[in-house]
Image: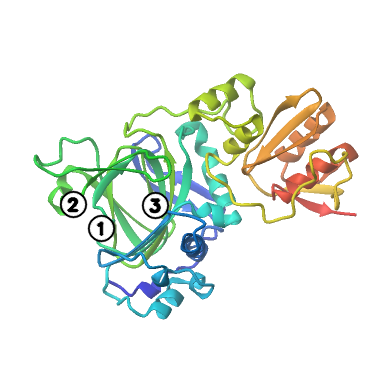
């Protein structure tokens, strides 16, 4: 295997998008281009997740294996400030992983530790929600780094659909459908996903090379990747040190044909119909309040990262008095923005996993629609829309073009 220290590659620079080679298939090759999703950013988010687990703020979100041995001692983990620069900086500190060692480094829910990464994933996924559907379970972003002959655990399947983006290196994913290809007598290990205890199945004794003719393989380099639906058997293989980002959307079933909930229109935007929102609540078995449900929708089921900017004006602050209210704004993010009445004269607006309430009215709604629809020119901010404009700027949906 090649030296692990070569794993970081130049960022992809084209406009953010993902394309499916087989849009209707249960597996598909992908091409993608998202400037913010670089190997360096993914590695940094991974190290923050390891650090959170090392100091007890998280649990069961990281794995580090060298030659099949699980290293549980946080002293071996990539957690320090210098470690976050690159795999090379961490490996230089450890100085115990050789260039030919089988190395597997993994972290889940990394979107909680990087607001830019979280926003980029929402922008990437949202246009495909009408076709792919919204899952009933949670969604999380995982990062895989290393050089390994097989994903630890071997051939396996889970109750989630996956978009797997290769950020650096060269990687293959082997796929099988159904169970009639599994040799008689093969041992099956049942497991559960740690957060929601959703089903997983493993064939740890089965060598993928013995069943290659019953499946198919896709190979990708930087800017490529793979999609597969719930219940598809798979196992990863790297051909050189790689970094990959996986978006797992849990369907709560191993059924490949699981039906997911389509949005109320051709995209996630605008006022959410009350009947659809009730269906969404049932679909995800949500027990929180209406605002939290809207927040979950705009985060596409993910736990979001905190905003990078300052908090928006408080819900009781009079309209137009938010500090630094911009005179004009323009839209800079394609992330979904949705809203729903919050009672007489009140409107809840949600985006990127956060919500705020505002005084409702036709002027506010008309300005909101116009500011979100037109990205070609600045929009002046009327006094009654000041708080809303300030909050959307704090969420990095809009940016101020002119401030007092």
Q: Position of residue 187 (x, y in %)?
A: 15, 44
Residue 319, position as x, y percentages in the image: 87, 39
- Along the line of sight, the residue nearer the viewer: 396 or 253: 253
Q: Which residue is mark 1?
A: 150
Task: Say left or right for 242 vs 214.
Answer: right
Q: Identify the element where label 2 is drawn.
A: helix
Other residues around mark 2 within 10 Å, as few (<14) / some (14–19) / many (≥20): some
Q: Could you say which is closer to the camera, residue 238 or residue 395?
A: 395
Instruction: Give the alpha-carbon distance from disc 3 to disc 2, as whole Å.
Output: 20 Å
Q: What's the residue at 17%, 43% (across, down)?
A: 214
Tag nearer the camera, 3 or 2:
2
Q: Disc 1, disc 2: CB below 8 Å?
A: yes
Residue 377 appears anywhere in the view:
no
Residue 304 image point, x, y percent: 58, 47
Quadrant in the picture for residue 337: top right
Q: Report the residue marked by disc 3.
A: 225
> Which residue lies under the disc numbered 2?
208
What's the CA distance linking mark 1 and mark 3? Answer: 17 Å
Q: Earlier in the sequence, mark 3 or mark 2?
A: 2
Residue 83's spot in the image, x, y percent? 48, 73
- 14 relative position to 402: left or right: left
Crowding at mark 1 (Cα within 10 Å: few <14, some 14-19, many 20+): some
Mark 1 to mark 2 CA distance (whole Å): 9 Å
Please give left or right for residue 170 compared with residue 58 in the image. left
Q: Residue furthest top?
A: 275
């Amino acid at each position: 295997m090649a030296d692990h220290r070569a794993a970081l590659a130049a960022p992809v620079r084209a406009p953010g998008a993902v394309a499916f080679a087989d849009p209707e298939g249960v597996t598909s090759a992908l091409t993608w281009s998202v400037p913010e999703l670089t190997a360096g950013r993914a590695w940094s988010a991974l190290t923050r997740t390891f650090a959170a687990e090392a100091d007890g703020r998280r649990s069961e979100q990281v794995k580090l294996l060298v030659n099949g041995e699980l290293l549980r001692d946080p002293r071996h983990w990539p957690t320090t400030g210098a470690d976050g620069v690159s795999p090379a900086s961490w490996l230089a500190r450890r100085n115990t992983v050789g260039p030919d060692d089988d190395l597997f480094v993994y972290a889940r829910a990394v979107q909680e530790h990087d607001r830019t990464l979280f926003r980029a994933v929402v922008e990437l996924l949202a246009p495909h929600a009408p076709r792919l559907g919204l899952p009933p379970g949670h969604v999380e972003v995982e990062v895989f780094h290393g050089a390994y002959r097989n994903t630890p655990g071997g051939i396996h399947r889970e109750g989630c659909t996956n978009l797997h983006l290769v950020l650096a290196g060269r990687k293959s994913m082997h796929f099988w459908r159904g169970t009639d290809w599994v040799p008689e007598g093969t041992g099956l290990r049942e497991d559960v996903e740690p957060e929601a205890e959703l089903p997983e199945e493993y064939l740890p004794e089965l060598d993928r090379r013995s069943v290659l003719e019953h499946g198919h393989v896709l190979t990708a380099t930087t800017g490529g990747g793979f999609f597969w639906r719930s219940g598809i058997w798979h196992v990863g293989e790297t051909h050189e040190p790689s970094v990959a980002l996986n978006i797992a959307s849990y369907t709560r079933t191993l059924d490949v044909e699981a039906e997911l909930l389509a949005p109320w229109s051709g995209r996630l935007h605008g006022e959410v119909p009350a009947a659809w929102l009730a269906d969404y609540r049932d679909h995800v078995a949500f027990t929180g309040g209406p605002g939290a449900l809207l927040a979950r929708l705009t985060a596409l089921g993910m736990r979001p990262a905190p905003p990078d900017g300052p908090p928006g004006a408080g819900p009781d602050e009079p309209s137009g008095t938010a500090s630094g209210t911009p005179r004009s704004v323009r839209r800079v993010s394609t992330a979904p923005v949705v809203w729903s009445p919050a009672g007489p004269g009140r409107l809840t607006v949600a985006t990127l996993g956060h919500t705020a309430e505002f005084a409702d009215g036709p002027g506010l709604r008309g300005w909101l629609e116009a500011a979100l629809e037109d990205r070609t020119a600045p929009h002046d901010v009327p006094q009654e829309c000041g708080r809303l404009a300030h909050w959307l700027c704090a969420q990095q949906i809009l940016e101020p073009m002119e401030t007092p």
